[in-house]
Amino acid sequence: MNGGPSGFANAPVTRTVIIISALFSIFFGIQGRLNSLDVFGKLRFWKWILSIFAFSSTPELICGLYLLYYFRVFERQIGSNKYSVFVLFSMLVSLLFEVLAVKFMKDRFVEQVSSGPYGLIFASFVPFFLDIPVSTRLRVVGFPFSDKSFTYLAGIQLLLSSFKGSILPGLCGILAGSLYRLNVFYIRKAKFPQSIASLFSRFFSPSMRSSRAPSTRNAVGNRPFYSAGRQAERNYPAPMQSAVEPSEESVATLVSMGFDRSAARQALVHARNDVNVATNILLEAQSH
């Protein structure tokens, strides 16, 4: 399983997060050995921002950027607007958990809390574990692996990169992702107002304007990533009399979610090449 089409097509928020994280890490984190624990003791807003985005070492930066890039598939699935809410929620909630944990376990974690977007990365592992199916299984030296195993290994590498210092923000990220999954405060239904979304679309890239429209139609039942639950849209468009050949990009996006290639192509034909509607069809077929 891969992250879908190469590059940042339909993933402008992910691209912006990666660029900011890379720049902040290079200029502030790696050079200055930024430690998020320093931020907790001093209420300086700009240092809080740095601690959220800047990794403190090169191995963490490489592994973290890879995972952020891989998880762009979720932005493509739910749309940039809702994904922006998920990014903001997971980062702020995980940071809050870190602050509380440091206050209660200060002696144990002094100068060992890693900085960087751990909250967003490990919050993304919640839908990755629950919603992304395994499409390929294999055995390596007698041990069972799947196409998801390498992503888990990268996550474990990042989680243990600084031992206690990285485990704490990683666990806080998983808690934040679980709260989003549980729809605390109905957060999964939240969207940025149209005025703010328009401002973001100009900031991120023109491509966000095109990716924003599908997000309003993302109603894919209970199983896909943080979907709309019981309000699943079942009025799929009927197949056109002259079948439209699905684009390779759409097929690759569905395959990256774990669906069979031939089934994905057939669903796209019925959905008139609409990836969100095709996802609905495939998930409902699996549930029967």
Image: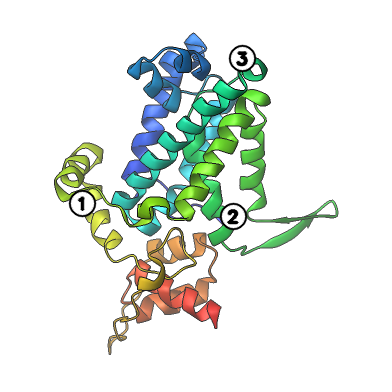
Q: For the residue carrying disc 2, how many other residues have a C-alpha within 10 Å: few (<14), some (14-19), or many (20+)?
A: few
Residue mark closest to the camera, 1 vs 3: 3
In percent of width and height, residue 230 lies at 40, 72
Viewer-side residue, 48 vs 137: 48
Viewed as shown, does residue 106 lie left or right of 179?
right
Residue that appears at 23% across and 60% down? 213
Identify residue for label 1.
Answer: 209
User: Relative to 152, is 218 on the left or the right?
Assistant: left
Q: Residue at x 38, y 35 (%)?
A: 17
Q: Which residue is the extreme one toward the front?
A: 104
Lower position in the chain sequence, tag 1 or tag 3? 3
Instruction: Kindly check if marks 1 and 3 are in contact, taking CB atoms under 8 A apart as contact.
Output: no
Q: Percent x, y for residue 225?
A: 46, 59
Q: Is residue 75 left or right of residue 65?
A: left
Which kind of residue does numbered mark 3 sit on?
Val
Q: List the residue tagged with mark 3.
A: 110
Return the x and y of residue 192 as percentages of the image width and height. Answer: 24, 48
What residue sits right under mark 2 in the picture? Answer: 129
Q: Quadrant of residue 271?
A: bottom left
Element type where label 1 sits in the image: helix
In the current view of this chain or complex, which residue is farthest to the left? 195
Residue drawn at x 32%, y 44% as measured from the top left: 12
